[in-house]
Image (cartoon, helix red, strand yellow):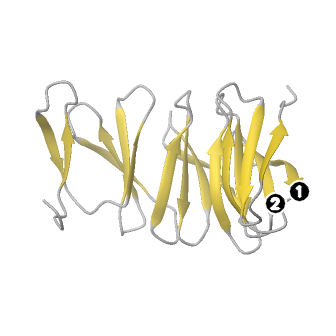
Amino acid sequence: EWGSREVKLWDAETGQEIAALDGALYSATFSPDGKTLATTGPDHSILLWDGTTGRRLQSLSGHASAVRGLAFSTDGQTLVTIDYAQEVKLWDTAAWRERATIPSHPGGVNCLDLSPDGKTLATGGEDRIVRLWDTATGRQLGMLMGHASPVRSVSFSPDGSVLASGGDDKTVRLWNYKRAP
């Protein structure tokens, strides 16, 4: 129901309700295997749910403000979260522990995307720069410069060989990408 604070989990094949999840919801994403649903709400935490039963598994905390977005790597080993204070965190999904905090761009982070192999995070910011990060360590791998205004979108190609970035300068840039082993 519109305006309700109840979130429901449905079986897509049967149309049957699986569970009603408690609490408000800002963002949600399933792990690649569908076994875990991660959600965010107004209390700065990330809630983890069993993706098949709707049973609450645990809560992750560590953000200073409400978490506005999250994404799993395609291998399911990393969960990336970003809050309203522009703080990006990388979580190890095997232990559900924070692996690293990514420094914000000057002016803030506007967008992010994970490479298909889950090893690289791309962030775009108000500083007109696309930054590349190692998801295992949080170490910055490089910077891609060329936009004349803030970067609003970044996206890896399905094979991870190209990174596209778009900005307020009304350009889309294509960057050849090959990560060194």
Identify whether 175 is placed above or below 15.
below
Identify whether 76 is placed above or below 6.
above
Q: Which residue in the structure is indicated by mark 2?
A: 129
Tell me, yes or no, whether the two marked residues, 2 and 1, touch with CB atoms within 8 Å: yes
Q: Is residue 103 visible?
A: no
100 and 128: which one is in front? 128
Q: Is residue 85 visible?
A: yes
Tell me, for residue 145, which label it has, or none. 1
Label 1: which secondary element? strand
The quadrant in which residue 134 appears is: top right
10 Å crowding of disc 1: few (<14), some (14-19), many (20+)? few
Which of disc 1 and disc 2 is earlier in sequence? 2
Image location of residue 135, percent across then percent down: 69, 41
Image location of residue 107, percent across then percent down: 72, 75
Q: Residue at x 16, y 64 (%)?
A: 4
Mark 2: amino acid: Ile
Q: Residue at x 49, y 72 (%)?
A: 65
107 and 44: which one is in front? 107
Image side of residue 45 versus residue 108, left or right: left
Image side of residue 135 versus residue 89, left or right: right
